[in-house]
Image: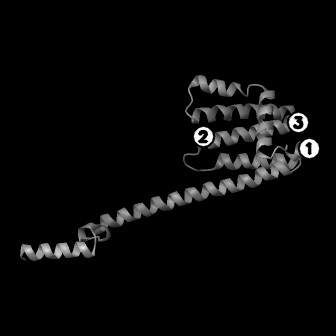
Amino acid sequence: MDVRVYRERFLFSCVLRPACLSLVVRPCMTPKLTTLLLLVLAILSGCASEEARRRELGKQTDELYAAYLDGGRDEARRSIVQANRLVEEASISHFEENRAFALFLGYGRLYALDHRAGNNELAELDLIKARYWALRSSEAHGDTPTEVAKYVDRFATSDRLLEFIDTWERKANHGREPKYIQHP
C-alpha cells in the first residue's frame, strides 16, 4: 500500500472516529480484554454491594434507634442490644472507626438505661464495654497512646459517661430525652 493512501485513510478514520471512541481488538488480545472487563465488573459490583450493605445497616440501625428513643425501658434496651449486634456483625470494609464509635454509643446508652433502672451489675458491664469501644474508636482514629488515654479518661466515671450520653441524646432528639426516662 502506498504511504500516501495509508496516511489519508488514517487521517480520515481519525476524523470520523476519534481514537478514544475506537477500540481495535486483535484475536491475541481477546483473553486479556475479557479478563480485564470481568475484573472491572467484579470491582464495580463489589463496590455497589458494599454501598448497599452500608445503606441497609444505616436503615436498620436508624429504625432501632428510633424505637429506642420512643419505646419504654424494655423496648429501648432490646433495640440497642439488637443495633449493637448488627454493628458488631457487619462485614463492611473501612468501617472499624465507625463501628467502634457506634458501639461506644450503644454501650453508653445501655449503661445509662441500666443505671437508671437500678440494674447495677449490667450497668457496670455496660460501662466497661463503652470504655473499651471508646479506646478502640480513638485507636482507629489514629490517636497516639497519650491521646487514647485522655479520650478514654473522659468516660472514666459513670457520671461522665451518663452526662455525655444525655447530652448526645438531647442533641439528636431535638432537646428531648428518650421516652424510657420520662415513662419507665
Disc 1 from disc 2: Cα separation: 32 Å
Residue beneath the point at 92% across and 43% down: 182
Is 22 on the left-hand or right-hand side of 10? Answer: right
Position above or below: 127 against 17: above
Q: Earlier in the sequence, mark 2 or mark 3?
A: 2
Q: Horizontal and vertical percent for residue 131?
A: 71, 31
Asked if disc 3 and disc 1 are in contact, CB closer than 8 Å, the reply is no
The residue positioned farthest toward the front in the image shown: 15
Alpha carbon distance from label 3 to label 1: 11 Å
Q: Split into 4 quadrants, where in the image is the C terminus?
A: top right
Circle 3: element type: helix
Mark 1 vs mark 2: in front: 1
User: Which of the 4 image quadrants contains residue 4?
Assistant: bottom left
Q: Exactly how many numbered labels are in the figure?
A: 3
Check disc 1 and report its element: helix, strand or loop.
helix
Please say if the residues under marks 2 and 3 sit with CB atoms less than 8 Å apart: no
Res. 184 visible in picture? no
Binning the other alpha carbons within 10 Å of mark 1 as few (below 14), some (14 to 19) or many (20 upward) gives: few
Badge number at residue 97? 2
User: Which circle marks residue 182 in the picture?
Assistant: 1
- In the rendered view, how is the structure colored? one colour
Q: Amino acid at mark 1?
A: Gln
Residue at horizontal 51 percent and vertical 58 percent from the top:
46
Q: Relative to residue 94, is residue 152 drawn left or right?
A: right
The quadrant the N terminus occupies is bottom left
The percent position of residue 107, horizontal first and vertical second, equals 75, 38
Q: Inspect the image, locate mark 3, and give the three-letter code of the amino acid beneath it.
A: Arg
Q: Secondary structure at mark 2?
A: helix
Q: Which residue is mark 3?
A: 116
Look at 73% across and 49% down and name the residue there. 83
